[in-house]
Image (cartoon, rainbow, N blue to C red):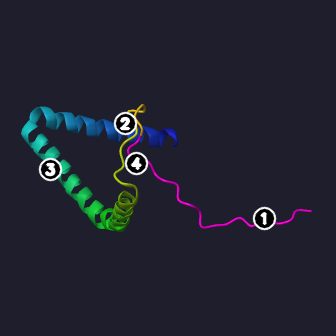
């Protein structure tokens, strides 16, 4: 950016800050009312964008995740957080090792 453009941007920012301070000191009620309205519109606009563009796409992923968690809990039991359990106690769920369905065929090695 060259010097003329830099000074132009500084001038615009300076005038905007002067206008902001002028409204803050001499018209305080309208300043806060306008600020709150801008924040309110921004929140409503952001929620609408989130609902229509982001929220709809995530619903399928969330339902698949919930199904996987339900299936995992059904298979392994309730999952406890490891940092809260006492490491000295043996775990309640002792899984038994299932025999493998594969068999080993011994061959002649030469």
Q: Residue 45 at what x, y percent from top left? A: 23, 58
Rate crowding at label 4 as few (under 14), some (14 to 19) or many (20 or more) other CA atoms within 10 Å. few
Q: CA distance from mark 3 to mark 1?
A: 80 Å
Residue bearing the label numbered 2: 85
109 inside magenta stretch: yes
Residue bearing the label numbered 4: 93
Q: Which residues are magenta?
A: 91-110
Write the residue at 74% across / 67% down. Answer: 105
Q: Which mark is residue 37?
A: 3
Q: Residue 92 at what x, y percent from top left? A: 38, 44
Rate crowding at label 2 as few (under 14), some (14 to 19) or many (20 or more) other CA atoms within 10 Å. few
Left or right of 18 in this view: 84: right
74 inside magenta stretch: no
Q: CA distance from mark 4 to mark 2?
A: 13 Å
Left or right of 38 in this view: 4: right
> Which comes sooner in the sequence, label 1 or label 4?
4
Q: Are marks 3 and 1 in contact (CB under 8 Å)?
A: no
Rate crowding at label 1 as few (under 14), some (14 to 19) or many (20 or more) other CA atoms within 10 Å. few
Q: CA distance from mark 2 to mark 3?
A: 50 Å
* Residue 28, quarter of picture: top left
Left or right of 50 in this view: 71: right
Rate crowding at label 3 as few (under 14), some (14 to 19) or many (20 or more) other CA atoms within 10 Å. few
Residue bearing the label numbered 1: 106
């Amino acid at each position: 950016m060259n010097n003329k453009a830099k000074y132009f941007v500084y001038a615009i920012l300076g005038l905007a800050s002067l206008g902001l301070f002028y409204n803050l000191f001499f018209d305080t009620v309208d300043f806060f009312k306008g600020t709150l309205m801008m924040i309110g519109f921004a929140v409503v606009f952001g929620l609408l964008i989130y609902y229509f563009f982001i929220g709809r796409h995530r619903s399928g992923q969330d339902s698949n995740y919930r199904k996987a968690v339900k299936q995992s809990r059904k298979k392994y039991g309730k999952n406890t957080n490891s940092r809260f359990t006492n490491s000295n106690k043996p775990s309640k769920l002792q899984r038994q090792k299932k025999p493998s369905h594969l068999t080993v065929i011994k061959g002649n090695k030469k």
